[in-house]
Amino acid sequence: MSSLTISTSSTFIIFFFLCLITNGLAADFHVKRYGARANGNSDDSQAIMRAWKDACMSRKASKVVISGGRYVVNSMKFKGPCMAPIHIQMEGRLEAPLNIQHMKSDDNWIIFEYINALTISGKGIFDGRGSLAWKQNQCASSGKCDSLPIIPSRVAISDVGFRNIVGTSTTRVAVKLVCSRGYPCKNVKLSNINLRYIGTNGTAISECSNVKPTISGRVMPPPCTRAFAI
């Protein structure tokens, strides 16, 4: 009867080869494994931030996976620099709190800063609940804008990609890329985007300020249909 014999040196070679394969793969960080519930009620901010922190510290390319579901999130700051290229796969729906008074003291809802080689993709939605927040804004009636201040951006954005985004828009401006005049965006890439305007006032358009994105694949509406200065 034949037998299989593996020497110690052979075992080491096989083990070393498997380690090389494992280290070459991108690491996935699923937010639900960090405690995100995605039920439309619970605050999932901390779970998402924990996933981001671990992904950002990874020495190999990483992916933060936000799978399907409704994630109610407070103010979140996705901050770098990160150790390697990082990808956010957005398949769920991020929703701001119904009451802006429940927001933290930050001036913004979601911020990406000091990150190189960031890619955001997927069919997910960032829902800031703007129509609800505007009603709670006192700027028009009293001039008090503490809850929803309008502040100029001083953050330089570069090496950002948006790809494989499909959906509809209730406003004619389906894509709006707004960058600071003092710190224009650099190396912004749009790839395979199809956003359709569902209203009756013409077709979807896009607006750009202080950015010239590069295009690959089919992008609808065409990028920078309308340019404006801020």
Image (tube, rainbow, N blue to C red):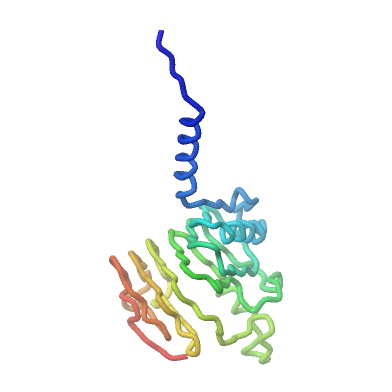
Which image quadrant is residue 113 in?
A: bottom right
Res 166 visible:
no
Residue 119 vs residue 61, the one in the foreground: 61
Position of 117 with respect to 155 (left or right) is: left
Decide if residue 223 is on the left or right side of residue 79.
left
Residue 128: percent from the left, percent from the top?
56, 70
> Where 96 falls versus 36 (above or below)?
below
Pick whichever, 82 or 35, lies toward us: 82
Q: Quadrant of the N terminus?
A: top left
Residue 20 pos. (x, y %): 46, 45
Q: Nearer the viewer, residue 23 or 178?
A: 23
- Work out whether residue 39 or residue 123 is closer to the camera in this orientation and state it: 123
Give me the residue at 62% from left, 89% from top: 140
Q: Residue at x 56, y 87 (%)?
A: 152
Please provide percent x and percent y for residue 211: 40, 82
- 192 in relation to 136, above or below: above
Which image quadrant is residue 142 in?
bottom right
Count every numbered label the image shows and give the total. 0
In percent of the image, x 47 and y 83: which residue is there? 179
- Residue 220 is situated, as x and y percent measured from the top left of the image, at 32, 70
Q: Is residue 194 above or below residue 108?
A: above
Q: Residue furthest top?
A: 1
Q: Is residue 225 left or right of residue 1?
A: left
